[in-house]
Amino acid sequence: MPPARRRADPRRPRAATSIGAQPAPAPSPTTALPDASAVEAGPAQFPGQGVTLLGYLARPQGSGPFPALLVCHENTGLVEHIKDVTRRLAGAGYVSLAVDLLSREGGTEGIRDAARVPGTLSNTPNDQFAQDFQDALRYLQGQPYVRGDRVGMVGFCFGGGVTWLVASRIPSLRAVVPFYGPLPMPADELRNVSAPVLAIYGERDRLTAGIPTIEAAMGQYGKTFDKVVYANAGHAFLNDTRSGSYNAEAARDAWARMLAWFDRYLKDGA
């Protein structure tokens, strides 16, 4: 069954029209190991508000400047899967920076008990998340290989919710793609979103129940919005390290649609 789709602005071309064939991610913890011939990747540190923020930066080889993406991790923190996603995005031509929202606790790797990570994140104020990504954006815009006026954002699960939040706080973002993210704020704050949004969800995910509220608000405020809901897919279907939720067919199509969205708003006409 094809994914159900609907848009607030029917005049826009369909997101799928510019999508080419994309390889399916392999079901392994590291589907895109750093390749010295194409991508430079490794840990990053940059100034935050009274703290040194940690992250993982991947970029295409060459001087650029390249468009850039902020990446927000799931509620498990900045784990290998998110580093892999960041490398894959760099392989598609984007400088990509995954921010570790546990930087004040020494980073995800500094928390010995992984079971503490979701609770720590859930007890952190949304304003702190928004500020950390504002600081990450400033850091990216200061790099000579980044095109500072072409920055977008993508996030997954918890990070999808943070992506909605940051989109409402940073008007300079040019495109955002939240994957199965809860709306972490009143819907009327969507009036502050400037970036075109492609929201990606699984039909079997309880969070999908929030889509009508999001869609109605984005339409009410005249925002550029599209959504994809994958039949037979649940929460975290893109995460190929989770055998219980990974859906290869949905993941392949969603990855292609995401890249097409970013290519349209961050690369086309650059």
Image: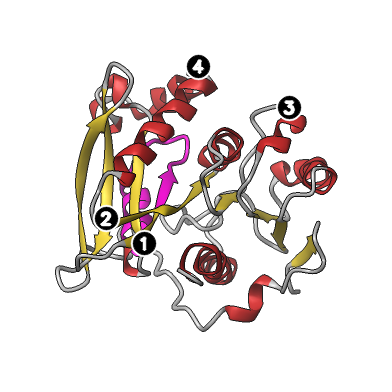
Indicate the position of residue 38 as horizontal and vertical percent values.
Answer: 22, 71
Please say if the residues under marks 3 and 1 sit with CB atoms less than 8 Å apart. Answer: no
Amino acid on which the number 4 mark rests in the picture: Asn
Magenta stretch bounds:
69-89
Question: Which label lies toward us, 1 or 2?
Answer: 1
Is 4 one of the magenta-colored residues?
no
Identify the mark nearer the N-term, 3 or 4: 4
Q: Mark 1 points at which residue?
A: 94
Residue identifier under label 4: 123
Judging by the rendered image, the residue that carries numbered circle 3 is 186
Sequence-wise first label, 3 or 1 = 1
- Please name which of the two marks, 2 or 4, marks the residue nearer to the observer: 2
What is the C-alpha distance between the residues marked 1 and 2?
Answer: 8 Å
Is residue 88 at least partly visible in the picture? yes
Number of other residues with Cα within 10 Å of mark 4, as a class: few under 14, some 14 to 19, many 20 or more: few
- What residue does disc 2 label? 58
Distance between the alpha carbons at the discs numbered 3 and 4: 18 Å
Decide if residue 220 is on the left or right side of residue 51: right
Residue 157, picture quadrant: top right
Q: Residues within 10 Å of mark 3 (few under 14, many from 20)?
A: few
Quadrant where the image shows the C terminus: bottom left
Dot 1 and dot 4 residues touching (CB under 8 Å): no
Mark toward the viewer: 3 or 4: 3
C-alpha gap between disc 2 and disc 4: 29 Å
Are the residues tagged 3 and 4 within 8 Å (C-beta)? no
Depth check: 185 or 219 in front? 219
Q: Which residue is drawn at 20% across and 67% down?
A: 61
Which three-letter amino acid code belongs to the residue tagged 1?
A: Tyr
Q: What residue type is labelled 2?
A: Ala
